[in-house]
Each structure stands twice: as C-alpha cells, then as structure tokens.
Image (spheres, rainbow, N blue to C red):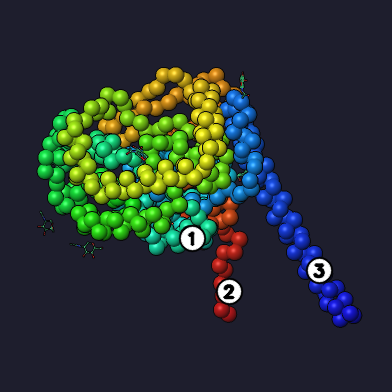
C-alpha cells in the first residue's frame, strides 16, 4: 500500500505533464476547428434554401478524412475536382503534395522524387497530374489511413475531348480540321508516335495511361482484366464524370465531409463551338475499338459506381437534392451570368466565369476561390508553403545560400600581434 502510494507520488509530475499536453492539443485542435466551422457556417448560411440535408449530416458520427490521394485523369472534370481539394485543404492549412510546375512527374510514373520536399511532414492531399504508381504512392499515402479516389468518363466523350484538347490531330499529322479524328481512326498510330510530344502519350486509352497501365498491355485482354481487378482493390472510390453530382455526394459520404465542402462551379469547360456534337456511329464505334482497355475500365467502374449508390439507400437522394440547391445558390450568389473566354494553354481557350462586382470583401475571396484557375491555385499554395517553411527556418534548405566574405564588418577584424 505504501509502496503504491510512493510510486504514485513519484509519477505525479509526469501525469500532470501528460494532462497538460493533452489539454494543449485539445485547445489547439478546437481553435482550428472553430476557424473551419466559421468558413462552413458562412457557406451554409449563403447556400441554404431549406434546412433539409442538414439534419442528415448531424446523425451518425464519423471523422473527416484528411489524407486523400486524388488520381487526376485527363478531360474527366478533374480540374473542377482539384479545385474542390484546393479549397478544402487551403482553408484547413493541410499539406499538399506540390511540384515546381503543374504536373507531378507525368507522363512518367509517379516517383518519390517528383514532389517538392515535404521535410518529413505527412502529406494530406495529392491532386495534381501524377501517373499512378502503387509503391511510392502507398509510401506517401498509407492505405490504412488514406483514401484513394479517381474519376472516369465514358470513353467516347473522353477520347473525343482528349483528342481535341491535346490537339492530337495536329501533332500526329492528321491536321486540325473536324475530320482529323475520323482520319486518325482509320488505322490508328504505332506506339512510337505516342512519344512525339508530351500530350501524345494520351493517344490511346488515356484513362488507363493515367492509371498506370503500361501500353504494352493495351492489346492483352488478360492483362487488362487483371489490371482492372488490381485498381478495384487500390481505389476506395472511382467516380464517374457523367454523373458528377452523384459522384461528389458519394465522395462526401466516403470522406465524411459536409455538403458545403463539395460545392463547385464547372471549370476548364470547352467553348461550345469546339464540342463536336454529333459523332457518327462509325467514329463512336472506332473510338471504342481503339480504346478497348478504357472501355473495359469504364464499364467495370460504372457498374460498381451504381452499386455503391444503391447501397447508400434513399437518404442519398435527399443529399443529392440538397446539394444541387446549394450549388445553384452559390452560383447565383457569386457569379455573373455571362462568361468569358480564357486561355488554358497554347491556343486552347476554355469558358471562364466572372465573379460579381457587388460583393463584400469576404465574399469576394470566398467566391474567387471557386473560379481560381488550377495554376493560380498551385502558385498560391507553393507560396504559402514557402512562407510556412520560412517561419521555421527550413527555407534555407531550399535555396542555395550565396556566402560573402568577412569584410562586411570590422569589429573582429584580424589584428595579429607583431613579433618582438
Ligand atoms: C491557417 O494558417 C494561418 C496562418 O498561419 C492561420 O492564421 C489560420 O488560423 C490557420 N487556419 C487554420 C484553420 O488552422
Ligand atoms: C519504334 O522505335 C524503335 C526504337 O527506336 C525501333 O526499333 C522500331 O523499329 C520503331 N517501330 C516502328 C514501327 O517504327
Ligand atoms: C498477357 O498478359 C498476361 C498477364 O499479364 C501474360 O501472362 C501474357 O504473357 C501476356 N500475353 C502476351 C501475348 O503478351
Ligand atoms: C452506367 O451504368 C448505368 C447502370 O447500369 C447505365 O444505365 C448507364 O448507361 C451506364 N453509363 C454509360 C455512360 O455507359
Ligand atoms: C420543406 C420546406 O421547408 N420547404 C420550404 C422551403 O422554402 C420555401 C421558401 O423559402 C418554402 O415555401 C417551403 O415551404
């Protein structure tokens, strides 16, 4: 009894210390939470028509997922997705996997040396173009603690969009007229031609390419099926652009986020005049035949997608309806009706939104983030990272320091004694 008593007293300071640490951590996380809740409250007030959809968020406890690898595929609405992740992570000061430019090593398979240094910080979000590579990605985003998400689109529209946006006709010698795609499809191209330029890597099965399948397997049914089974295990959610809102609501549920966190306005959409409206039956069929691996990929995940939606039960539709109302509200609150043309890259223009002029400063910032272009967001996040590194003195390890001589001060100038 006495021994126990003594031991307890010996340990008292440690117990006290432990309790203090717990208290400090608690207040720290509370203050972060308050900040985040404040932003959410603003959006919620602004977007709520009726209260429905809110009740459902309250019931059932889960914790928001803050470790997410979003595998960005081309021409699948993934710029809009990236914007959602940028806003979410920025408002919570989460750590992004960034690169010096827009791409994270793409078209090379992702490698641990592609991102800017993380200095042992555990990353929260990767949402830039990186080609899937299990090992290094699992290293940065362990499967037990992270969610893996990607998005696909029906291969006919996807390939047509990739072909047009990446100007494949021009780059591969089929001209840039509307019939370039048809000409391309008459016999396709050999593998070597896919190395002509950066974007020509997307000339066949662009979604499978981004997801990491080696082109040497594109014509091997066994290998393609095996790879789809592999992806099925690696990804927690494969969204479908053709059902964008449904996809986001599924993601919100998977990540335990709020409806406010997945609001968006469509970014990087092509100008109407560039959308080839009616592809002939032959062209559609040939797109499928040329991109057979993507067709199998899409069909598999479109089926699993709808199975997942079904499993969510009827409350899914309530969420979806509430989400669409909020989305309309934020759009009419933030944006002007007319759109403008914006340069995406080279000679490619996309539709851009204009933020309304008559907004309060706080709203102007909030609304501005919805339409901020990917590269502008990345610049901003890189700058934010730099400022953070500077406050802890780590920026010194990024720049090579130029040193100068000792002649800048005289206080300790060398004055040798004379030998007598
Ligand atoms: C994010 O960091 C900024 C600057 O350090 C700070 O003012 C803000 O409170 C932080 N927000 C959250 C949610 O932690
Ligand atoms: C593709 O390139 C390789 C290596 O440069 C060459 O050996 C091969 O003949 C080329 N194939 C075609 C079809 O041009
Ligand atoms: C097709 O892929 C399978 C599985 O990866 C492999 O065993 C087989 O050798 C491949 N066939 C050809 C012709 O390359
Ligand atoms: C996706 O699957 C659903 C349900 O099976 C089907 O109705 C729909 O046509 C499919 N979508 C596409 C684009 O193939
Ligand atoms: C279900 C519900 O509360 N509906 C209300 C939504 O808001 C409109 C007007 O703001 C009301 O008329 C509805 O009764």
Q: Secondary structure at mark 1?
A: loop
Instruction: Mark yes or no: residue 131 visible.
Output: yes
**In the picture, residue 50 is in which quadrant?**
top right
Task: For marks 1 and 2, give the CA distance.
Answer: 64 Å
Q: In the rendered view of the protein, which quadrant contains the C terminus?
A: bottom right
Q: Quadrant of ligand 3?
A: bottom left
Task: For marks 2 and 3, give the CA distance.
Answer: 56 Å
Q: Is residue 346 above or below residue 203?
A: above
Instruction: Mark yes or no: residue 397 visible.
Output: no
Disc number for residue 142: 1
Tell which circle, 3 or 1, labels the residue nearer the N-terminal end. Answer: 3
Tell which circle, 1 or 2, labels the residue nearer the N-terminal end. Answer: 1
Q: Is residue 44 above or below residue 214?
A: above
Q: Secondary structure at mark 2?
A: loop
In the picture as drawn, the residue positioned furthest to the right comes out as 2
Q: Secondary structure at mark 3?
A: helix
**In the picture, residue 338 is in which quadrant?**
top left
Residue that label 3 marks: 13
Q: Is residue 351 above or below residue 12?
A: above
Nearer to the camera, 186 or 133: 186
Percent of width and height locating residue 400: 44, 57
Percent of width and height locating residue 1: 89, 79
Q: Residue at x 56, y 46 (%)?
A: 256
Mark 1 Cβ inside 8 Å of ligand 1:
no
* Foreground disc of the pair 2, 3: 3
Question: Tag 2: Cα neighbours inside 10 Å, few (<14), some, or many (≥20)?
Answer: few
Task: For marks 3 and 1, give the CA distance.
Answer: 36 Å
Q: Residue at x 16, y 49 (%)?
A: 193
* Foreground disc of the pair 1, 2: 1
Residue that label 2 marks: 417
Percent of width and height locating residue 303: 37, 45
């Amino acid at each position: 009894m006495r021994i126990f008593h003594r031991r307890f007293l010996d340990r008292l300071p440690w117990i006290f210390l432990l309790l203090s640490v717990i208290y400090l951590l608690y207040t720290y996380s509370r203050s972060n939470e308050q900040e985040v809740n404040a932003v959410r409250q603003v959006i919620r007030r602004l977007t709520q028509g009726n209260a429905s959809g809110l009740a459902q968020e309250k019931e059932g406890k889960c914790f928001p997922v803050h470790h997410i690898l979003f595998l960005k595929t081309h021409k699948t609405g993934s710029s809009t997705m990236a914007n959602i992740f940028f806003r979410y992570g920025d408002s919570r000061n989460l750590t992004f996997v960034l690169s010096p430019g827009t791409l994270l090593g793409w078209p090379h398979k992702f490698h641990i040396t592609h991102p800017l240094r993380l200095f042992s910080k555990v990353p929260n979000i990767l949402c830039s173009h990186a080609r899937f590579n299990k090992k290094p990605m699992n290293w940065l985003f362990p499967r037990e603690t992270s969610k893996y998400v990607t998005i696909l689109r029906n291969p006919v529209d996807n390939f047509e969009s990739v072909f047009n946006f990446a100007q494949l006709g021009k780059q591969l010698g089929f001209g840039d007229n509307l019939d370039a795609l048809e000409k391309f499809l008459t016999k396709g191209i050999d593998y070597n031609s896919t190395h002509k330029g950066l974007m020509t890597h997307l000339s066949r099965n662009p979604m499978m390419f981004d997801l990491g399948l080696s082109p040497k397997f594109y014509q091997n049914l066994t290998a393609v099926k095996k790879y789809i089974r592999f992806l099925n295990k690696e990804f927690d959610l494969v969204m479908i652009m053709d059902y964008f809102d449904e996809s986001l609501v599924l993601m919100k549920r998977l990540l335990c986020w709020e409806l406010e966190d997945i609001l968006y306005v469509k970014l990087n959409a092509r100008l109407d005049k560039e959308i080839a409206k009616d592809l002939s039956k032959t062209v559609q069929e040939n797109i499928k035949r040329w991109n057979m691996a993507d067709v199998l990929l899409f069909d598999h995940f479109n089926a699993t997608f709808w199975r997942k939606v079904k499993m969510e039960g009827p409350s899914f539709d309530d969420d979806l309806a509430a989400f669409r109302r909020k989305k309309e509200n934020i759009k009419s609150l933030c944006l002007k009706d007319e759109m403008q043309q914006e340069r995406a890259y080279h000679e490619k223009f996309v539709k851009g939104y204009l933020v309304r002029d008559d907004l309060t400063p706080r709203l102007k910032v909030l609304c501005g983030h919805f339409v901020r272009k990917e590269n502008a967001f990345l610049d901003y996040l890189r700058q934010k990272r730099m400022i953070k590194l500077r406050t802890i003195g780590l920026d010194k390890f990024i720049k090579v320091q130029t040193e100068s001589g000792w002649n800048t001060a005289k206080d300790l100038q060398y004055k040798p004694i004379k030998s007598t």
